[in-house]
Image (tube, rainbow, N blue to C red):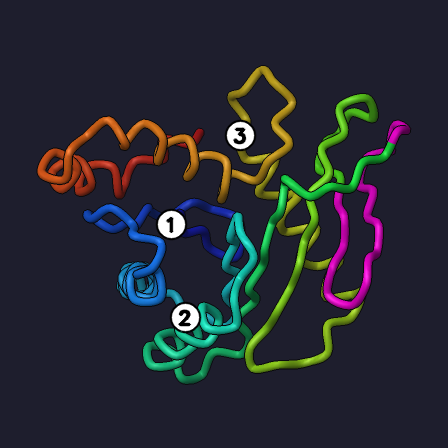
């Protein structure tokens, strides 16, 4: 998990030192979120809104478990946005899209184009849930879109038009690399990586 503040400034990384058994995610993911919140609160900053990006669909149980640990740590939290960023959806458009294209789908879903180049479209299906539950308006979905867009632009050293937000792209990349370490090695490496902005 990569943690950013409200200005898009990267703070640190938190992760588990164990392999993530998919069946145990309901206990592991809330634990990582708890550690991330503790690290963020230690900096003295207050938290009013939390966006959690996930590369799969958030189940209701996952949302409830995560929200429970969040309100235990921050009872005054206003909103927790659970954002599924799906890059493997079946929707295909056969035309060039202008920058900042947003296509409304049903209810809490939109399709977004994060590329600044019309000939390099990369559509993501965004699904939003929030707790405590409130109406998900187009205005809220657009706010989420602009935050994702800004997190896509953070890879400022790349010579390639990066179209994926750093919250997902580099978590996935480092996860692939870390498959080559055993648990003992990862326990030592994890501490050093936590405060290095390796995604830039």
> Circle 2 — which element?
helix
Task: Say which of 56 and 77 sits in front.
Answer: 56
Q: Residue at x 84, y 50 (%)?
A: 103
Q: Is residue 27 left or right of residue 185?
A: right
Q: Earlier in the sequence, mark 3 or mark 2?
A: 2
Estimate how packed mark 1 is, as few (under 14), some (14 to 19) or many (20 or more) residues with alpha carbons within 10 Å: many
Circle 3 residue: 155
Circle 1 residue: 1
Front disc: 1 or 2: 2
Q: Residue at x 17, y 42 (%)?
A: 191
Q: Is residue 189 left or right of residue 75?
A: left
Q: Earlier in the sequence, mark 3 or mark 1?
A: 1
Front disc: 3 or 1: 1
Q: Is residue 177 left or right of residue 46?
A: left
Real-space CA distance between mark 1 and mark 2, rounded to the nearest whole angstrom: 13 Å
The span shown in magenta is 94-112
């Amino acid at each position: 998990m990569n943690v950013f503040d409200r200005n898009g400034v990267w703070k640190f990384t938190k992760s588990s030192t164990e392999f993530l058994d998919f069946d145990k995610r309901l206990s592991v993911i809330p634990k990582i979120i708890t550690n991330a919140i503790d690290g963020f609160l230690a900096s003295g900053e207050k938290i009013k809104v939390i966006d959690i990006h996930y590369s799969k669909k958030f189940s209701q149980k996952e949302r409830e478990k995560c929200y429970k640990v969040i309100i235990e740590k921050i009872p005054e939290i206003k909103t927790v946005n659970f954002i599924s960023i799906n890059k493997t959806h079946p929707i295909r458009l056969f035309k060039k899209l202008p920058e900042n294209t947003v296509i409304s789908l049903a209810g809490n879903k939109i399709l977004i184009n994060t590329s600044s180049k019309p000939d390099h479209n990369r559509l993501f299906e965004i699904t939003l849930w929030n707790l405590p539950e409130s109406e998900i308006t187009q205005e809220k979905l657009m706010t989420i879109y602009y935050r994702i867009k800004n997190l896509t632009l953070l890879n400022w050293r790349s010579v390639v038009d990066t179209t994926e937000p750093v919250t997902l792209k580099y978590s996935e990349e480092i996860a692939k690399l870390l498959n080559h370490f055993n648990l003992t090695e990862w326990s030592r490496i994890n501490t050093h990586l936590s405060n290095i902005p390796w995604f830039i």
